[in-house]
Image (cartoon, helix red, strand yellow):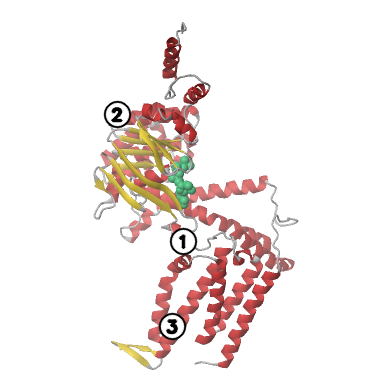
Amino acid sequence: MIIKLEDLTYTYSQGTPFEKTAVDHVDLEIEEGTLVGIIGHTGSGKSTLIQHLNGLIKPTSGKVYIDGEDIHAKGVDLKKIRFKVGLVFQYPEYQIFEETVYKDISFGPRNMGLSEEDVDRRVRSAAAMVGLDDSLLDKSPFELSGGQKRRVAIAGVMAMEPKVLILDEPTAGLDPKGREVILSQIKEYHDKTGSTVLLVSHSMEDVARFAEKILVMNKGKVFCYDDPPGVFTRAEEINAVGLSVPQITKVFIELKKRGLDIRTDVYTVDFALKTIKEYLEEKGGAVNA
Amino acid sequence: MLKDITIGQYFPGTSVVHRIDARFKIVITAVFIVMLFSASNYSALCVPLVFFAIAFMASKLSAKLMIKSMKPIVPVIIITSILNIFFIDGVSVIKIWKLNITDNGLYTSGFMIIRLIALICGSSLLTYTTSPITLTDALEQMLKPLAKIKFPAHELAMMMTIALRFIPTLIEETDKIMQAQKARGAELDSGSIPQRAKALVPILIPLFVSSFRRAEELALAMECRCYNGGEGRTKLKTLVSGGKDYAALSLSIFFLSVVFILDLGKVSF
Ligand SMILES: Nc1ncnc2c1ncn2[C@@H]1O[C@H](COP(=O)(O)OP(=O)(O)OP(=O)(O)O)[C@@H](O)[C@H]1O
Ligand SMILES: [Mg+2]
């Protein structure tokens, strides 16, 4: 287990009238090398949850284990944990500060105290990984477009080559093509390095396509944590708590509502096609597709 | 962390104190401060304390909150009291090595501490129960007569409103940027002083960049809504004063006169 959370609770502004429990008694175990999609409503506590994983916030109660180590135990160097668990924030482009893209990406690796060659190698490979052209490396990051800045920020964390990479809505505010590119690059990073990746997203479609496991959060609690087929057997429940399921799943839920005896754990178009064919065959009708 | 700063924070509520006209609240706070500083002996000093206690109970705020607002001034209190205890002449009570603690020293420093704490608590009560916007609105109205001598009352109030409005935003943003840089291994709270100063660069630059962007956006948004200064501008929410406001003000003036009477009755020192 690379990540283990035990009865984790976090309350913002405790003791004031603004008190708000953002994470509510969460127990969770994530296996090494999994690509996990995290999904939930606005305000369901996703960002709060992931900030616990590298010790940026200290739980109000409960424990966080990374690689079997309690990160808030005495004598644990949180800085080391942060190199192990890389976190890319929501709208990470606001963290950019250096004069050149190269320097900004190298901030993390330099803090790790690596040699100059090592830093150079990591910066270049991270830049390539997120699809930043070599010619951009000497430019000022403030001259780049929003999407490019986003990539610089993601590369800045990837360059630390963390065992666990966490991205908080890396595709928020990007165009469909930019989203697609960033998501497939993240997937590629995962496949190439075999690292654990946690991807927070608002789009069930994206998560269903890329993730090996899905964590659904609802009001600070874990609604379910399972592989996509497992999660989508509960598609109706998820739909009922107001979380959007993929369009195609909605179609099937609606079909069932209208009296068809059909499964609703369908989340890709290919699988939908197969399901419809099977259904029609079962009914005895001839199918020409 | 930064979130613990409560200065200028407003806690919405519906108590009497919340509902008193902000202009009156400002005047009453001023009266309270005059009470504190004109009290020259302990019995007179009790009067503003009683006054504060009444206002505080009426506000229905938690005592925890008040205690929290004291946090930043603890060092100031400690330093003043130490200076006072040791450096005021009088009859020695306790002697530590070469330093004399005198009766006058104890008397004065106790006095100072109570005054200081009451001062902070009183002004905190004002900001806790009045939204910053209302507060500047009230200030603007109180300063309006000065516009005749070309005093920029509206501009001043607008600047204050904007500044106050953006304090929480900036704090939140600083917090976020700090977290993001920490996630990249930045060390902010250890190392030598030059190291720490250098560690601020990754925080200050993004903060300035985003502040300028915000200022630009705000200016643009204000222009789009045809903002052109205070001339002929009417308010959506006008401040209205009523019986309870005058009653509260009378109460404070009554307390103030009690302070004066006690001051005259028992002249100390
Ligand atoms: N700094 C903060 N101070 C106080 N409350 C906060 C703070 N940050 C978040 N919250 C509250 O905690 C809850 C969870 O917030 P969080 O940011 O974790 O949600 P989220 O799932 O990431 O939402 P989104 O999808 O919009 O990013 C929200 O109700 C929010 O209002
Ligand atoms: Mg979030």
Q: Are marks 2 and 3 in contact (CB under 8 Å)?
A: no
* Disc marking residue B109: 3
Residue B112, horizontal then vertical, whole percent: 47, 80
Reading the image, the residue beneath label 2 is A192
Residue A85, horizontal then vertical, whole percent: 31, 42
Mark 2 and mark 3: Cα distance apart in space: 68 Å
The residue at the point 37 percent across, 37 percent down is A155
The residue at the point 50 percent across, 63 percent down is B7
Reading the image, the residue beneath label 1 is B5
Look at the numbered disc 2 and give the secondary structure of its residue: helix
Q: Earlier in the sequence, mark 1 or mark 3?
A: 1
Residue B190, horizontal then vertical, whole percent: 31, 58
Q: Vertical placement of B214 versus A155: above or below? A: below
Q: Vertical placement of B136 versus A127: above or below? A: below
Q: Say what amino acid the circle numbered 3 marks.
A: Ser
Look at the numbered disc 1 and give the secondary structure of its residue: loop
Q: Say what amino acid the circle numbered 2 marks.
A: Lys
Is residue A53 or residue A241 the one in the foreground? A241
Q: Is residue A213 left or right of residue A68?
A: right
Within 10 Å of disc 3 (Cα), the crowding (few <14, some 14-19, many 20+) is many
Q: Say what amino acid the circle numbered 1 marks.
A: Ile
